[in-house]
Image (cartoon, grey):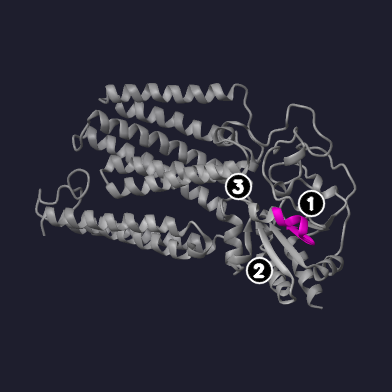
Amino acid sequence: MTLGFLSALRGISYLGASMLFILSLRGLSNQQSARGGNLLGMLGMALAVVVTGGALVMSNLLPAGAGAGAGAGAPVATGGQAIFLLAAALIGGGAVGALVASRVAMTSMPELVAMLHSFVGAAAVLVGIATTLQSEAGDGGRGTAHLIEIFVGVFVGAVTFSGSVIAFTKLRGLVGSRPLMLPGRHALNGLLVGASIVLGVMFVNDPGEHGMTLLLSMTALALVLGVHLVMAIGGGDMPVVVSLLNSYSGWAAAAAGFMLSNDLLIVTGALVGSSGAILSTIMCRAMNRSIWNVVFGGFGAAPSGPKAKGTAAGSAPAGVVHETSVAEVARLLLAAHRVVIVPGYGMAVAQAQHAVKEISSFLIAKGIKVEYAIHPVAGRLPGHMNVLLAEANVSYEIVKEMEEVNPELPHTDVVMVIGANDIVNPSALDDTSSPIYGMPVIEVWKAAHVVMLKRSMSAGYAGVDNPLAYRDNTLMLFGDARQSVLALLAALQS
């Protein structure tokens, strides 16, 4: 087996894996084909891992000099060592991934995704440092383009790593959801970016004995920048932040591909980076905000202007709450002709999606039209509610987007809001002092009756009070969402 054959085989396999990744993204564009899209992505990644690992092993088994080009630089291990190291990495990483996937609940998926993004960032940083060390040892090129690739890859990777770790702590509740609003925070961000660029110019112009020191100094600044950027973002924007970090991780992977001269890694990183950026833009449009406002706006902080009654963040409840019972809600549902269910993060925390699905199936069997209304930023992860409903085997046909449901709400008898707060807040439309003013929401108050299932009257994750709870056509059913839904199901069946 020759170098030319190995190179051709790897190129063809990488092209096939790239096509599978593109088809995977296409499949993920709608719920009906999402499962198939995931399978195609898994197949593409398996092909990429097998081909890359096989090329690495074969390059070390070939006679000296024959296998160069299978990877960056000369072989670093014997054939037996390469096989052992590769097997250890695959088995160890696969075991950890399988254990994490089997133990993480759906409610913890946002935290898991954020943490996985941090791994990609850390990998880009380590690849950049290793490439620099390899170059200093005389085993790699030190052209200007190569040095810029290293600098950009490490910078983006460091920002992704520290930002993703902070996102994980916020989603996990280890750090408060309120944004950290330091005086002169924009100047601080500019200073960190400017200093990093200066260090990068010095690194490219003089990568000699001080090259590693300059690179590590820039890495430290980028880590601080990532921490500060995400700490300044409030809880209400965390779905967008997770999507944005996904984009960052893609660009970090692409930069690592340039450093390693790996075409597939470049293509894969570009696909992830661009799709994450597009998703972030779509979600920002759903909130009627720009991506710059999300990253630098400090959403979730108390507004500086006068607060409208009962709507500003942190304000005391103002109005009369109409508390209801399970039996009364059951009577409303059975008397309805059309019911809309709006799920939120509270449903995810209570793991009530299966019981909710049983209620909708029961009502549909009674001839009542039931639909689910999904807001683009419901939950703490893009598509969070869609995944939960899919897990409960809710039919895709009755899961509707906000734009589809809003025109039909005036003709709806009952809307049941389960653990959602900000996405059904009328302050977004009529209170200019509210932090969420201008954000499109599901206009549930237009229905004849609204039933809100909540633990208490506390504000949602964004810290914004919801005057919907005080409207005359709103009934509050307090308690754990799962227990309330199970009791409601029992009441319906009896």
* Residue 171, disc: 3
The kind of residue on which mark 1 rests is: Trp
Position of residue 225 relative to residue 361, above or below, is above
Describe residue 141's horizontal placement relative to residue 437 as left or right: left
Mark 2 vs 1, N-terminal side: 2
* Residue 354, disc: 2
The kind of residue on which mark 3 rests is: Leu
Label 1 vs label 3, nearer the camera: 1
Q: Position of residue 272 (x, y in %)?
A: 42, 48
Q: Which is nearer the eye, 175 or 257? A: 257
Q: Which is nearer the eye, 218 or 27? A: 27
Residue depicted at 69% across the width and 39% down the height = 436
Residue depicted at 79% across the width and 69% down the height = 488
Residue depicted at 41% across the width and 25% down the height = 196
Tell me where the magenta segment starts and ends, as one range: 407-417
Sort mark 2 into few (<14), some (14-19) or many (20+) by Cα contacts within 10 Å: some
* Residue 445, disc: 1
Label 3 vs label 2, nearer the camera: 2
Describe residue 172's horizontal placement relative to residue 208 as left or right: right
Describe residue 320's horizontal placement relative to residue 394 as left or right: right
Q: Is residue 122 visible?
A: no
Q: Position of residue 340 (x, y in %)?
A: 72, 61
Q: Is residue 416 magenta?
A: yes
Position of residue 236 relative to residue 185, above or below, is below
Mark 1 vs 3, N-terminal side: 3
Image quadrant occupied by the C terminus: bottom right
Q: CA distance from mark 3 to mark 2?
A: 23 Å
Q: Which is nearer the eye, 164 or 477? A: 477
Q: CA distance from mark 1 to mark 3?
A: 29 Å
